[in-house]
Image (cartoon, grey):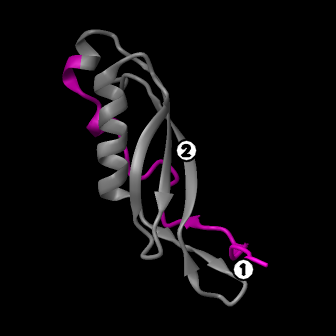
């Protein structure tokens, strides 16, 4: 009988800001000028070290600039408490998140 994959006993948790530190200051000037707003959904791996890896867009905002910026910033900034298996050892898991891009109000 094949050994069963370890099960997640404790899911990952985001350290700090739920939006991965993405703020109005990150809004691309070109997107603001062009009135581009939207919601980008991403999927990713959470490594055993608590970093984001393999970020990919699962639902586009409709604007490639906003979508690519979401993964770039999230991968740079996101930090996690990694998931743990039954023995309390960190394990790699997958996650998903939605980031809303709204043009900052002055």
| Residue at left offset 31%, top offset 33% | 68
Lower sequence index among marks 2 and 1: 1
- In front of the other: 90 or 65: 90
Q: Is residue 19 left or right of residue 69?
A: right
Say which residue appears at 53% left-offset and 69% top-offset.
92
In this picture, is 51 found above or below 94?
A: below
Q: Which residue is mark 1?
A: 3
Residue 5, magenta (yes or no):
yes
How many marks are shown on the rendered structure? 2
94, above or below 19, in the image: below
* Residue at the disc numbered 2: 97
Q: Nearer the viewer, residue 44 or 36?
A: 44
x, y percent for residue 47: 45, 68
Give residue 63's position: percent from left, percent from top: 36, 18
Image side of residue 22 versus residue 19, left or right? left
On the image, the x and y values in percent for residue 29 come to 20, 23
5 lies left or right of 18: right
Mark 2 vs mark 1, foreground winner is 1
Residue stretch in magenta: 1-30
- Secondary structure of residue under mark 1: loop
């Amino acid at each position: 009988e094949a050994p069963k994959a370890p099960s997640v006993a404790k899911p990952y948790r985001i350290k700090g800001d739920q939006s991965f530190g993405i703020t109005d200051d990150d809004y691309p000037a070109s997107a603001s000028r062009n009135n581009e707003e939207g919601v980008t959904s991403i999927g990713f791996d959470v490594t055993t070290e608590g970093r984001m890896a393999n970020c990919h867009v699962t639902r586009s905002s409709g604007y490639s600039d906003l979508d690519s910026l979401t993964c770039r910033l999230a991968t740079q900034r996101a930090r996690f408490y990694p998931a743990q298996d039954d023995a309390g050892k960190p394990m790699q898991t997958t996650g998903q998140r939605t980031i809303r891009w709204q043009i900052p109000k002055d």
